Amino acid sequence: MAKIILSLYGIILLVGAFIGWKAGSKVSLMMGLISGVLVLFGVYYSGIKLVCGYGLIALTSGVLVVTFLMRFLQTHKFMPSGMLLVLSLLALIISLKILLTK
């Protein structure tokens, strides 16, 4: 179940990259693509080396939690920073729970 949720999170990041690009943000495109690919690679790699795969997801989502928290505190808008903050926090909690129980 965790892999499905984290895969959906990675896909949402990729979709968000293209939505940001359509709105004129090349930075959103690059960061969304990089973070989405890192999360999806982490999901894939967790089948090979569990600690490395979920560690990569935890690191990526942790950085995104900080990023989206700062952005949300500046704008006070739920979309997109608040939503992505919640999703990134969920991904961080899931990946850390798996890492700490293995």
Image: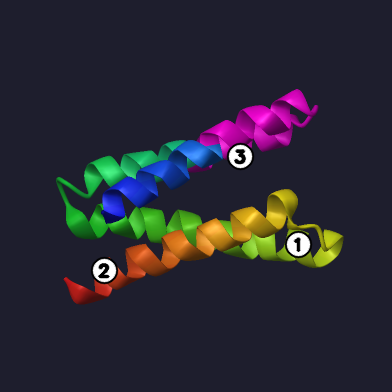
Q: Pointer 2: residues within 10 angstroms few (<14), some, or many (20+)?
A: some
Q: Where is residue 47 in the image (x, y as percent from the top left)?
A: 16, 46
In the rendered view, would you say 6 is above or below 14?
Answer: below
Q: Where is residue 73 in the image (x, y as percent from the top left)?
A: 79, 67
| SS state under label 1 | helix
Tag of residue 99: 2
Query: What amino acid is at disc 3?
Result: Met
Residue that mark 1 sits on: 72
Distance of mark 1 from mark 3, alpha carbons?
Answer: 17 Å
Q: Range of the magenta residues?
A: 14-35
- Residue at the image position 57 percent from the left and 56 percent from the top: 64
- Indicate which disc, 2 or 1, sits on the residue closer to the N terminus: 1
In the rendered view, would you say 7 is above or below 25?
Answer: below
Distance of mark 2 from mark 3, alpha carbons?
Answer: 25 Å
Left or right of residue 32: residue 60? left
Left or right of residue 89: residue 53? left
| Residue sticking out furthest to the right | 75
Circle 1 or circle 3, nearest the eye: 1
Residue that mark 3 sits on: 31
